[in-house]
Image (tube, rainbow, N blue to C red):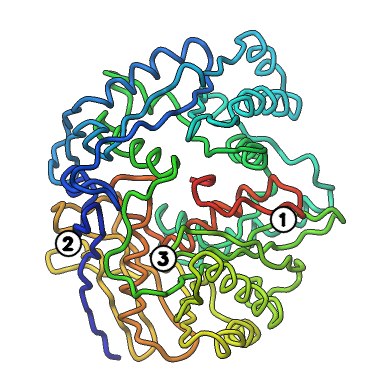
Amino acid sequence: MNLTIATLKEPKLEFGNAVTGEDPKVYMPISGPLLCKRDTPAKDIHLGLVALPDQIEPILSWFEKMDRMIVSPESNAKRFLEFPGSGKAVKARFIVDKRFIARLDSNKFALALAKSGSEQFGDLLKLYGDAIGSLFVDGGPACILVCFPEDVAALRLENFALSYEQRRKLERLKQREESNQLEFFEPDPQELKSAAELLPQADELLFRNFHRALKARCMMQPNAVPIQVIRRHTYAQDEKDVKQSEATRAWNLAVALYYKAGNIPWRPADLQANTCFVGISFHHLKTRAGNLIYSSLAHAFSNDLEPFTLKGASIPHNQIRNKQPYLKPDQASEMMQRVVDNYESKTGTKPTRLVVHKTSRYQPEEEEGFRINAQADIAEIDLVWLASTGFRLLRRGMKEPLRGTLCSVGEDRNFLFTTGYIPSWEEYPGPHIPSPLEVGSSGRTNMEDRAREILTLTKMNWNSADGIGRMPITLSFARRVGMVMTEMDDNAVPNPSYRFYM
């Protein structure tokens, strides 16, 4: 059996002034975020705030601190850079506008928290939702901070809307999902987490999560803007029990808020122009008729437009093969046509190339459906699948493999390490030996090129200033949308913007 190893270079990102580089924390303070010019002054970004009265002053104090340099105490200065102040880090000043501070009534909060079950969940949801909705006004904030006490942040509830029979079906599904995850060789927590990212999870429907219920409620209101949930460990100062340093927290929050306020921090520097990358995923969803179904989602990403999401066909629970849901030809064709139409409406032209990412191997019906429209309108289409794996690889000296390592075994098996040792940081940022994603395709393609694209798309994580994730944005975004959709009516159309799901 032949085994070959290639090391792909760390993909570069484009920042302001068309400057390119690997690390956002190095290049944004120098060149600014994407589309910034050298003489562009820092912009004011007005934020709203929903919080209990005793939380407001500490949060305001934290944002005042973010205006200044925050030194990093971390031992690895190459990875954990000082925060130079939001004006230099992202060319923006975050202003918590006093006009947009909604103080939660402490008595109403205490009364709601003292209740239990669905009554507690519903009363807290209304309390927070009404306060947030009061800030959805013309000329309002660009993003709203919502502060959760720890007992609210951890709040989840059994989904009492399920019938006994539906719950039994979901519990059997959960057992099967856990069994599938344990098929790995000596699985560790990282691998199990990765498997959960890639597969539909029955837990999403068995339990209601307060955070995603609030997001679903708020994004469907008129004049909605994104919300950013913050907890004490986000804004606490000089406290020893907070895991991340103040500089790291400031960096991550600044990047997330900059994006949620309608800006783009960075984009890939080397992706092929006029290419649309599409992630296909499946999620459990309960229909009004009481049947358990899968909802399909398509998430599109391109350097030419904002990421967007489309809800696809609802799939009967028994439409599975090899333990995975799949699309029939007409469902796949209709989904891909809508992606192409949306791309064209946003850019004025059809993409010249489509790359589809999926979390399981393509069934013949899916391949047929995805290629129908592509053959008529698109010059090229690549159908790529990704799967979790327990594959192991170490460098000489028992060192972790480099991020970007592509290991090919035989003629048709390829393993891509999207996590691993990062030379510019001189560090592997993980607790366990990294495990790769297996990458394959339906039809002939250049697998090294496809792996390079996947590695690039793992750097579109605007929830972190590191700019590195395990999964490409095509699949990680769809996952977030699917979880929020469990809180929506089956006829609801999810907001297409990534900003509402981060």
- Tag 3: amino acid: Asp
Residue 259 lies, in percent from the top left, at: 40, 44
**Callout 2–callout 1 Cβ contact below 8 Å:** no
Q: Which residue is mark 3?
A: 304
Q: Is residue 48 left or right of residue 246?
A: right
- Pick whichever, 178 or 496, lies toward us: 496
Residue type at mark 1 is Leu
Q: Nearer the viewer, residue 20 or 186?
A: 20
Q: Which residue is pictured at 43% across the width and 60% down the height? A: 473
Instruction: Name the N-terminal-most of marks 2 and 1.
Output: 1
Q: Which residue is mark 1?
A: 285
The extreme right residue here reads 289
Q: Position of residue 329 (x, y in %)?
A: 68, 83
> What residue is pinned by disc 2?
399
State which tag comes first along the sequence, 3 or 2: 3
Crowd tier of the residue under label 3, counting other residues whose Cα lies within 10 Å: few below 14, some 14–19, many 20 or above: some
Q: Quadrant of the N terminus?
A: bottom left
Image height of 457 relative to 370, above or below: above
Q: Is residue 383 above or below residue 260?
A: below
Earlier in the chain: of badge 3 and badge 1, it is: 1
Determine the image quadrant of residue 111. Answer: top right
Nearest to viewer (mark 2 / mark 1): 1
In this rendering, which labeled residue sits more in front, label 3 or label 2? Answer: 3
Neighbour class for label 2 at 10 Å: few (<14), some, many (≥20)? few
Residue 311, image x, y percentages: 65, 61
Considering every residue shown, the one lying at the far top of the view is 107
Separation (CA) of disc 3 from disc 2? 39 Å
